[in-house]
Amino acid sequence: MSVAASAYAGKLTLITGSRRGVGRLMAEHILAQGGRVAGFARGESTIDHPDYHHFQVDIGDPASVQQGFAQLKKVSDTVHIVINNAAVLTSQYAMIMPPAQAQAMLNTNLMGAFMVSREASKMMRKAKWGRIINIGSMAVSLEPIGDSMYAACKAGLATLANVMAKELAPLNVTCNTLGITAIKTDMLAQLPQDKIADVIAGLPLPRFAEPDDIFNVIDFLASERSAYITAQTIYLGGVN
Amino acid sequence: MLNQAAVQEIILQALNNINDERGPDEQLTVGLDTRLFGADAVLDSLSLVSVIVDVEAAVSDAAGRDISLTDDRAMSQSVSPFTDVNALTAYILLLLSEPA
């Protein structure tokens, strides 16, 4: 059995934002490794697989998250791995950023991850095992113009993981953050391509991230052997 | 609706769950006057959180409605609902006596 397969076999992984982009790629990867996946997303499922359970949840709404977990508990007693991936992005100078867009980023990108981690850790508590992986961003380090709220939310995600790592350590639950670089997704397509090209050119490893770059770190953090790795942020592409 | 004895049983069971995870030399003395929070509390912070989570879930399941033991109201009571088992029982019965 491969390292990746052993990380997911017999386990349920909850992925937020599983309909598209990086979330969908990760869901399909874990399903291919023989794991079960629960997906939280606002829209209907885009994944057709017998081991995939989809729940229509707006993670920016705490009540919706709690309803999602109530439904999830009907198919599983526990969640083993959580990947807080869902995010929305509006890139704009702060002076003209609509407050509603900024609030939406805060609700989904940070509060949503908090609520999902909160509810999942209650389930992990009984199993005395868990992995919480937050999907961060190179924006935390690069601090690009226009991404003030987005980068702040992603920085908050790492802090969220670090504090929860301490709270959940006695329960054998680790909490880490993967800071991803640009990968060709719908979200990236919203941004000016010249801006993206400049960012990529400035990376120590100047290329887009590939799905396998992300899978490699997720597999590592989710594995049994990573039980002694918590409160860490791992960046791709040489970002630090 | 849950009565006093049923609520007490749920709380005592949550405390017994903590004992199940402890060694023989670390067992809590579980009773209606067991101190949950404050200077004389027998629970460490994570154990208290575990008891709250277990009790919230069990009461919500048994009553068929969600209750919250950690909202602003609970935290602002003049006498903490988490003082001991009796205080927590009284607070839960108060919540259950109100419309959902």
Image: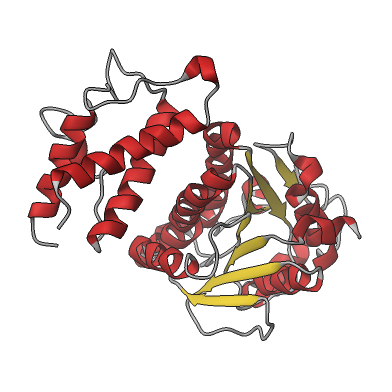
- Residue B73 shows in the view: no
Residue at (50% x, 32% y) in the render:
B20
- Position above or below: A132 against B86: below
Residue under the point 67% across and 76% down: A51
Percent coordinates x, y for residue A54 in the rendering: 55, 77
Residue at x 74% of width, y 45% of height: A234
Residue A91 visible in image: yes
Is A186 on the left or on the right of A106, as rendered? right
Q: Give residue B53's quadrant in the image.
A: top left
Position of residue B75 in the picture relative to residue A3 (left or right): left
Quarter holding residue B66: bottom left
Provide residue A19's location: percent of width, then percent of height. Answer: 60, 78
The x and y percentages for residue A15 are 61, 65
Quarter of the image with the N terminus of chain A is: bottom right
Q: Tell me: residue A85, above or below residue A220.
A: below
What residue is drawn where x is 51% and y is 48%? A121
**Percent x, y of residue A64:** 38, 68
Task: Farthest residue to the right: give it.
Answer: A1
Residue A45, above or below A37: below
Question: In which quadrant will I find the C terminus of chain A?
Answer: top right
Q: Which colour scheme is used?
A: secondary structure
